[in-house]
Image (cartoon, rainbow, N blue to C red):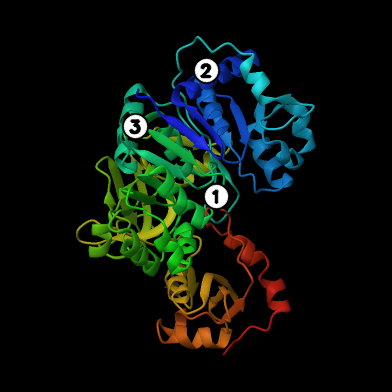
Amino acid sequence: MTSGTIACGSVCITRTNLQVHAAQVAAGLRAAGVQAGESVALLLRNRIEFLEITHGIGRVGAYDVPLNWHLKSGEIEILLDDCSPRIIFADADLLRELPGAWLQRATVIVVNGENPTTSYVPWRDRCAPCPLPPTPAPGSMMYTSGTTGRAKGVQRHAPTSEQQKDMRAIRAALYQMEPSSRAMVPGPLYHALPNKFALHAALEAEHLTICPGFDPEDFLATIERERITTVAVAPIMFIRLLRLPDDVKRRYDLSSLRWALHAGGACPLDVKQAMIEWWGPIVAEYYGGTETGPLTLCTSQEWLSHPGTCGKPLPQARIKIVDADRRDVTQGLPGEIFARLLPYPDFTYRNDPDKRAAVALGELVSLGDVGYQDEKGYLYICDRIRDMIVSGGVNIYPAEVEGALLALPGVEDCAVIGVPDAEFGEAVVGFASGSDLDATALRKQLRERIAGYKTPREIFILPSLGRDSSGKLKKSRLREHYMEIKAENDPVTD
């Protein structure tokens, strides 16, 4: 293992420091009675301690459970009740969101700031490094619900040594990570891509910068200052970068950048095109999920030749596309995607084996997406199974309508949902935010771009759609508030 550094804000440590601290964390967890297979929760913002705690948890064979710190107390309580952690690591200012019951049920270790409960650094530093060799760890148990439904804890089986070796090789190729790489993670570490990317880079790259948050101009300045070579981003970050004034975009030297990998949702075609034109053919994406790991990879060159694709399956990935009866669809026609990355250990949904069985097709797993493959094997994602709208017996994919809506002048964000309709079963409804928008004008422009039956019957103009830090949007919340919004607005209808 080569030497390296990890930085976040004004703090910078060596890889050796990271390993020593991880061994101390492991010793502290053992002393606290944490056993292999148990859960340890992290309610932490982006910080170096996130990585050393995660590696320490892995050393004792326990599950690290990263929690979205944007959640409210009641939402966090549901996750804690499900994973039942023995220990919770939390930022001091996030303690207010910890449910009172869990302040009593678990040992809470405060990672920054002084608090009557245990303070992290003294707790860590009084522990002699754990002398035990690393235990094969099951890894992170992340809670995922996509954009719909109640969160599910993806509880993975402990990997074999061969699986660990295969996954390191797959991630090295996916992240374009070498010992000389200088990596940066601007996304929240409680999400899968930033989490796995950062954990891998911390052990393999020459340098890793963890951004406390995402600021578009600071992101560019950091690339120049740190001579960053590889980054992991979300499409929403591309959109915010492209909104920067041209003189700001030209201000920074990005010539060190060799690989910009994105995932975590569809990237609008015009946004992807603009990023490739700006940064060159270094923009890549993959398709996958918390349950499956990465399944495809698409380079800039492949995307330019096949606009809209998320790439071909990785060599060790298997993909099958089926209809509602789970029969193979004709090539080129959309269906539900079932897939698996063979070296990835199997999983279950914590406390819900029935949900795990419901997403299975033999050894393959569904992430709830609709898509198709072309004659060359390139995969295209149409939409989410649950988001698909059936209006008058016709399937309408919101992602297609959203793409058309987002391309209109002034539209900065949008979403399309289906709502109950007495005549057609479902009707298409749109939401948009941006500058000087007029619902009547938007609907008129849409009719010139897409079929009339796909054009939203109603469009609501909102100040914001309320996406989270990774760019995901809970459409279930839009549906829940639809009647309230309808009552408070004067939507444009035919």
Query: Are the residues tagged 3 and 1 within 8 Å (C-beta)?
Result: no
Q: Give the percent coordinates (x, y) of residue 169.
A: 30, 33
Residue at horizontal 68 percent and vertical 32 percent from the top: 112
Query: Label 2: how many residues lie within 10 Å, few (<14), some (14-19) or many (20+)?
Result: many
- Image quadrant in which the C terminus is located: bottom right
Residue 100 in view: yes
Which amino acid, by three-letter code, is at mark 2?
Ala
Which amino acid, by three-letter code, is at mark 3?
Arg
Q: Badge 2 is on which residue?
A: 23
Classify mark 2: helix, strand or loop.
Answer: helix
Q: Is residue 366 above or below residue 387?
A: above
Which image quarter: residue 208? top left
Residue at horizontal 37 percent and vertical 32 percent from the top: 206
Query: Label 3: how many residues lie within 10 Å, few (<14), some (14-19) or many (20+)?
Result: few
Q: Which residue is farthest left?
A: 376
Could you tell which of marks 3 and 2 lies nearer the N-terminus?
A: 2
Could you tell which of marks 1 and 2 lies nearer the N-terminus?
A: 2
Classify mark 1: helix, strand or loop.
Answer: loop
Q: Give the percent coordinates (x, y) of residue 379.
A: 30, 57
Q: Is residue 333 above or below residue 142?
A: below
- Image quadrant in which the N terminus is located: top left
CA gap, disc 1 to disc 2?
33 Å
Q: Nearer the viewer, residue 422 or 277?
A: 277
Q: Badge 3 is on which residue?
A: 168
Query: Are the residues tagged 1 and 2 within 8 Å (C-beta)?
Result: no
Q: Nearer the viewer, residue 409 or 351?
A: 409
Q: Badge 1 is on which residue?
A: 145
Query: Label 1: how many residues lie within 10 Å, few (<14), some (14-19) or many (20+)?
Result: some
CA gap, disc 3 to disc 1?
26 Å
Q: Give the percent coordinates (x, y) of residue 56.
A: 53, 23
Residue 422 in view: no
